[in-house]
């Protein structure tokens, strides 16, 4: 039976989401696995928040593993919907892998957007006085550690330009790890 | 047996996180439930990302329900760690409730930070060309819908100032819903 992989990410917000999804599913097929891309399910003008949730939730339950596009979205962290889904699939005990086209660490991204950081008692705070996690990880520690705990890994392949959010090169690297 | 409530949120990044946690736990106690605040477990200079993850994960598994501080953190969405934990507790089938001190909808927050929005084919895109979910919800639809599916609700009580991130008034309103 073909292994089914849920393809989570902010790709669904790209204007060419459908094409990105098709390309990622094709790459899966070349590797002998089946990609489940959320957009396939939620297309249609009559889609409601509830129907999209239900479709994505059902896809995640059907999937054998998850590949998560953790490229930062509207801030220094990964897309909130993607991170929710990571927590969900982690709790279901399914293997989860991450990938991103941003090579700067979370700490550096917060510094860039909310710095300059202030040091106090050997801890670093952003300009709003909020603690900055300084573990040199890809994102909030719950994200990185969940992927590690679930025997996955995070592929980082820097990419710029219009399609950076799709992180196609990091996706390929991640797929390679998953199929290794 | 006293009902145990996991108190998720970006509160742990406040400089007075310990005090905020204590106050939230006291409010829980007044209502006859036990608050489990993540910081209690991860304090200590020797804490690593892995040990904090493990402590929080264990607390969530012990908890009977979760209260999630969804106040936006470093962007228009809730804190990534908090959202991860929401997905995790949702998947475990535990009741989850949300609260926030920001009364603007997600759509309006994205407009403010990443607008002006462009309309195309009856859909709205931010200035980076990324689709804006326009359901008038509190955050990404996966977050709002999960809370609804899990029989919870999201308490919104606007608050400004230094402690807005703790959302203490919305927390009280949320606790009231949970204990109703």
Image (tube, coloured by chain):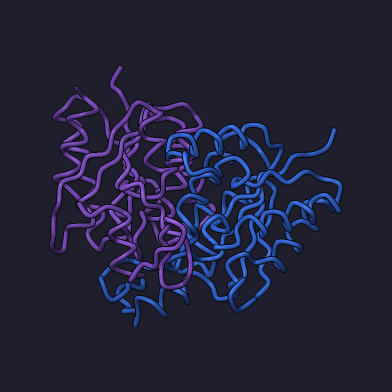
Chain colours: A blue, B purple
Residue at 26% x, 55% y is: B17
Rendered residue at 84%/53% (across/down): A180
**Residue B61, percent from left and from top:** 47, 32
What residue sits 25% from the left and 63% below the top?
A: B15
How many numbered circles are shown? Answer: 0
Outermost residue, bottom direction? Answer: A116
- Indicate whether B47 appears above or below B99: below
Q: Position of residue A92 (x, y in %)?
A: 59, 33
Res B171 → quadrant: top left
Quarter of the picture holding the N terminus of chain B: top left
Q: Quadrant of residue B150?
A: top left
Relative horizontal placement of residue B1, taking residue A66 as reference (left or right): left
Above or below A85: residue A58: above
Q: Is residue B118 above or below residue A179?
A: below
Quarter of the figure that contains the C terminus of chain B:
top left
Residue B151, position as x, y percentages in the image: 35, 26
Lateral position of residue B30 relative to residue B47, left or right: left
Q: Quadrant of residue A23?
A: bottom right
Q: Residue at x 47, y 77 (%)?
A: A108
Residue B59 at x, y percent in the picture: 42, 37
């Amino acid at each position: 039976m073909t292994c089914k992989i849920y393809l989570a990410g902010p790709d669904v917000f790209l204007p060419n989401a459908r094409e990105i999804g098709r390309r990622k599913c094709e790459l899966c097929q070349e590797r002998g696995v089946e990609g489940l891309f959320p957009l396939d399910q939620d297309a249609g003008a009559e889609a409601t928040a509830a129907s999209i949730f239900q479709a994505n939730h059902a896809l995640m339950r059907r999937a054998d593993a998850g590949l998560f596009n953790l490229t930062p979205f509207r801030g220094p962290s990964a897309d909130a919907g993607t991170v929710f889904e990571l927590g969900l699939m982690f709790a279901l005990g399914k293997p989860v892998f991450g990938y991103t086209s941003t090579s700067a660490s979370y700490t550096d991204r917060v510094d860039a957007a909310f710095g300059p950081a202030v040091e106090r008692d050997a801890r670093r705070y952003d300009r709003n006085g909020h603690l900055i996690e300084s573990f040199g990880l890809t994102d909030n520690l719950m994200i990185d550690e969940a992927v590690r705990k679930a025997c996955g890994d995070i592929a980082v392949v820097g990419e710029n330009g219009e399609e950076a959010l799709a992180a196609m090169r990091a996706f390929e690297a991640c797929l390679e790890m998953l199929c290794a």
